[in-house]
Image (tube, grey):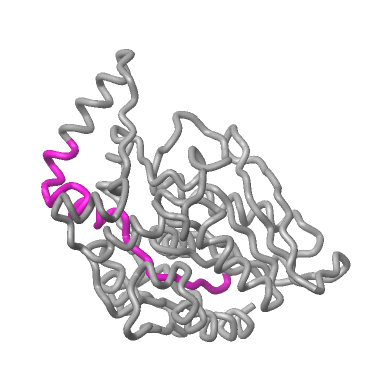
Amino acid sequence: MSISIQHVTYPNLGWDSAADIYLPADFDPNRRYPAIVSTHPIGSCKEQTSGNVYAAGLARAGFVAIAFDASFQGASGGQPRFIEDPAMRVSDIRFAIDYLQTLPYVDPQRIGAIGVCGGGAYTIHAAMTDYRIKALVSITGVNFGRLIREGFSNFDPVAALQAMAAQRGAEAQGGARQVINYLPPSVVEAQQSGISDIDVLEATDYYKSPRGQSANGATSGLFSFNSAAFGWDAFLQAEVLLTQPLMVVVGDKPGGFGAYRDGCEIYGRAASRDKHLVVAEGWSHYDLYDRTEPVALAMERLVPFFKQHL
């Protein structure tokens, strides 16, 4: 027997969210299962690493797992498209929990959360203010607020915000939306333009090739709406509010997106008494998306962690 996937929609703020529910191979609708919300990276979708790797792996381990598309992205509703607003991404996690708690086969007191890349940091932030999350795992989590203030704005956040303000003003007056792609079209083109950062090159290899490419994984962002992330910090108040059991998984090959640094930071700052930092030695940020060996290493640690706390 193999795991099964159900495609569902459920209400969000004036639109519907689209999600895939991964069910264990021996699924019995008359039982009550622990359930885990899986949140995708920035510019990604539910069919990629949050769903086909981590949600699927958790289902094989006996959990119900739900991987959803962010609002304004993928198959979920919301206009305009391609908004990447941290507050909305955190809100999406709460709505996924709402939905899980309506399902008769989910134990509403045994809900956990996992996220990959930006989704890992969004999961951390959600857990600080939603104690329905009983345990959480961040897989190579990236604090998008820090990243957009630094590398994504060429370390000139004020100039970036000025450009976004001008663009949003133009759009408000009828101008065309400016949708940017976070990545180069291919690894070859990235290298030809002088890019050498491991995260950018490996992200391009994942998202722009058959390895991870998906129709809904657009790696796109609405430029003028990205301004919302500049004043946001995924880890704000973690020393006080992040009390649930926490596991942070990072690779030890650091890249420009900063997951290794962010992982070490939140591990140190979290108020959680039960917290674990798992370093996948010899592996990178994007290896933890889908490469067999580092994913197996992560699963070997996170499955017992969730079984203990859920």
- The structure residue drawn at horizontal position 32% and vertical position 60%, both measured from the top left corner, is 143
Q: Residue 297 in the image: x percent, y percent?
A: 48, 84
Please state which of residues 52 and 16 is positioned toward the viewer in this rendering.
52
Q: Is residue 278 above or below residue 287?
A: below
- Vertical arrangement, residue 310 with respect to residue 72, above or below: below
Q: Position of residue 301 (x, y in %)?
A: 51, 85
Does the magenta-highlighted stretch encompass residue 41? Answer: no
On the image, the x and y values in percent for residue 51 come to 57, 60
The C terminus: image quadrant: bottom right
Residue 253's quadrant in the figure? bottom left
Q: Residue furthest right?
A: 30
Q: Residue shown at 71%/58% (left/top)?
A: 101
Residue name at image x 35 percent, y 40 percent: 221
Image mark count: 0
**Residue 195 location in percent, x, y?**
17, 56
Q: Quadrant of the N terminus?
A: bottom right
- Nearer to me, 178 or 29: 178
**Side (left or right) of 227 relative to 86:** left
For residue 13, side relative to residue 22 (left or right)? left
Horizontally, is 148 left or right of 133 in the view?
A: left
Q: Is residue 144 left or right of residue 243?
A: left
> Depth check: 45 or 77 in front?
45
Residue at 53% over, 61% down: 50
> Where are the magenta residues, as a range?
134-161
Q: Is residue 262 above or below residue 97?
A: below
